[in-house]
């Protein structure tokens, strides 16, 4: 299995620290609002990586953190007149609902909260101070970037350039405290009465963002982990600063492999609240099943930018319907087939199933190539639709269905039938029968009128060898 390692800018053979085990940390959301579509991409991409690694026989310990103390959370609590915990509990609950709709594998995901590890965070900061890699100024604690080895090695940034750039910006009260403009906060002094805070050796305050992830990763996964992942927007400064403080304290490599996904654009433009093209999953799922969003996110190489338009999502929905309909058809065949045992002339078809699996593994082994993996799934769908019918044995039909569903499961694709609580199934069946009768009477105008009436109800019909089939559109 190969991974593109951001640290080396190369696609490398993945070699775990422990044989057949993976320790993986993915930067999760700051829980002060509903997840936006950009948050969904790393969650879906790396959930798929976890699923594939497990499919390939790895035991995966998988962490996605919740940042539950932050300026944005404090501001939200003030705006809504509730506690910061009420804010974070509300949006973690919303996260879990969205995670279910995206079919994220939550059963095997660890979700630490920064506020649960405050003692460990304080201990981490104390360790950096003892190493003279951090300093205290009026209740704030800053990390000395000059003490980090190879700072900038992940992002490719040069410290001297960073210092020059930072020095040319307008100076704030916080920056004037720093020994160097590139030093960053490990601990922030409480500024306002009533703000959430914890006692520390430096007074009341709360941790900086970067130290939270370093501590959670170390506490759960150890000092050196296999893979650290997240969106490419986190590469600098967040991930760079995680490396600096973790490797300075532990004197060990923090993560052997770094994976970063590309950003989402909306109609070819960077997503931004100010541009009015900012979409939360909470809003999107009023219009689309989030399974369609998951499928769409996997149709492009995870390291490349991906464009969100309604036309593209509609196309993804239609493509997913093709897969779903094939699965539903195979399930129906399985219920109605009479022949049980596989026949001699079917064994060659069974052998072909192995080729689909081999191709799937080949492309997924190549840095999680989900786009080509979906192509393999469509080839299997075509095989199922053209080669399998009621003439075949139950054993063959089941083998094809099992193979298709297993490859879907690796991608996290769940076959969901469209539903509408207001639909009147008896009326649909009645209209279909009326249409059948009109066709028998060669009253094709009436048959077309009934088809149009069904379409207006949100129902598509299809004439098949097994009769008229209908589905919601």
Image: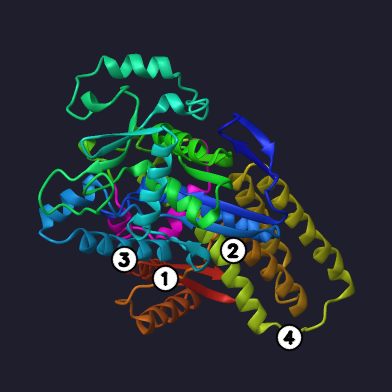
Circle 2 crowding by C-alpha within 10 Å: few under 14, some 14–19, many from 20: some
Q: Which mark is residue 409?
A: 2
Q: Is residue 218 magenta?
A: no
Q: Is residue 27 left or right of residue 350?
A: left
Q: Which mark is residue 338?
A: 4
Q: Nearer the viewer, mark 4 or mark 2?
A: 2
Identified at 28% across, 55% down, the residue is: 34
- The kind of secondary structure element at disc 3 is helix
Residue nearest the observer in this picture, 114 or 461: 114
- Nearest to N terminus: mark 1 or mark 3: 3
The reply to whether residue 263 is visible in this rendering is no
Answer with mark 4 or mark 2, whichever residue precedes in sequence: 4
The residue carrying mark 1 is 447
Q: Give the Cα distance between marks 2 and 3.
A: 25 Å
Are the residues tagged 1 and 2 within 8 Å (C-beta)?
A: no
Q: Are marks 1 and 3 in contact (CB under 8 Å)?
A: no
Residue designated by label 3: 93
Q: Marks 4 and 3: which is nearer the front?
A: 3
Q: Which residues are magenta?
A: 279-304
Label 1 and label 3: CA atoms lie apart by: 48 Å
Q: Residues within 10 Å of mark 3 (few under 14, many from 20)?
A: few
Instruction: Identify which residue is drawn at 34% across, 37% down.
Output: 267
**Above-or-below relation of 10 to 260:** above
Q: Secondary structure at mark 4?
A: loop
C-alpha distance separating marks 4 and 3? 47 Å
The tag earlier along the polypeptide, 2 or 3, is 3
């Amino acid at each position: 299995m190969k991974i593109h390692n951001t640290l080396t800018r190369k696609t490398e053979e993945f070699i775990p620290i422990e044989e057949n085990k993976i320790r993986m940390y993915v930067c999760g959301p700051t829980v002060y609002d509903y997840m936006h579509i950009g948050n969904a991409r790393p969650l879906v991409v790396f959930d798929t990586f976890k699923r594939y690694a497990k499919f390939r026989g790895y035991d995966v310990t998988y962490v996605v953190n919740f940042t539950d103390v932050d300026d944005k959370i404090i501001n939200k609590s003030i705006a809504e007149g509730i506690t910061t915990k009420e804010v974070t509990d509300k949006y973690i609950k919303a996260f879990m609902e969205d995670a279910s709709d995206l079919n994220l594998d939550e059963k095997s995901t660890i979700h630490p909260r920064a506020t649960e590890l405050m003692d460990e965070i304080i201990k981490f900061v104390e360790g950096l101070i003892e190493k003279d890699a951090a300093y205290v100024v009026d209740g704030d604690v800053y990390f000395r970037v000059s003490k980090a080895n190879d700072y900038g090695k992940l992002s490719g940034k040069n410290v001297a350039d960073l210092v020059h750039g930072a020095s040319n910006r307008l100076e704030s009260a916080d920056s004037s405290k720093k020994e160097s403009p590139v030093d960053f906060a490990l601990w922030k002094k409480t500024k306002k009465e009533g703000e959430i805070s914890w006692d520390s050796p430096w007074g009341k305050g709360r941790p900086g963002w970067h130290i939270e992830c370093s501590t959670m990763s170390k506490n759960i996964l150890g000092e050196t982990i296999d893979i650290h992942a997240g969106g490419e927007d986190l590469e600098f400064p967040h991930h760079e600063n995680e490396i600096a403080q973790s490797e300075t304290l532990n004197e060990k490599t923090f993560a052997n492999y770094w994976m970063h996904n590309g950003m989402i654009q909306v109609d070819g433009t960077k997503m931004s609240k100010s541009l009015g093209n900012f979409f939360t999953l909470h809003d999107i799922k009023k219009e689309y099943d989030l399974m369609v969003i998951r499928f769409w996110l996997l149709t492009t190489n995870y390291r490349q930018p991906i464009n969100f338009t309604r036309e593209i999502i509609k196309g993804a929905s239609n493509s997913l319907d093709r897969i779903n309909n094939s699965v539903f058809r195979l399930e129906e065949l399985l219920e109605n087939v009479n022949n049980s045992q596989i026949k001699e002339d079917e064994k060659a078809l069974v052998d072909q199933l192995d080729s689909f699996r081999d191709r799937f593994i080949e492309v997924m082994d190549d840095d999680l190539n989900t786009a080509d993996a979906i192509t393999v799934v469509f080839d299997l769908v075509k095989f199922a639709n053209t080669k399998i019918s009621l003439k075949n044995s139950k054993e063959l039909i089941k083998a094809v269905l099992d193979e298709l569903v297993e490859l879907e499961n690796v991608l996290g694709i769940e076959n969901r039938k469209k539903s509408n609580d207001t639909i009147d199934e008896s009326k649909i069946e009645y209209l279909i029968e009326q249409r059948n009768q009109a066709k028998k009477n060669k009253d094709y105008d009436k048959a077309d009128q009934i088809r149009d009436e069904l379409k207006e109800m949100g129902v598509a019909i299809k004439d098949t060898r097994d009769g008229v089939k209908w589905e919601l559109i």
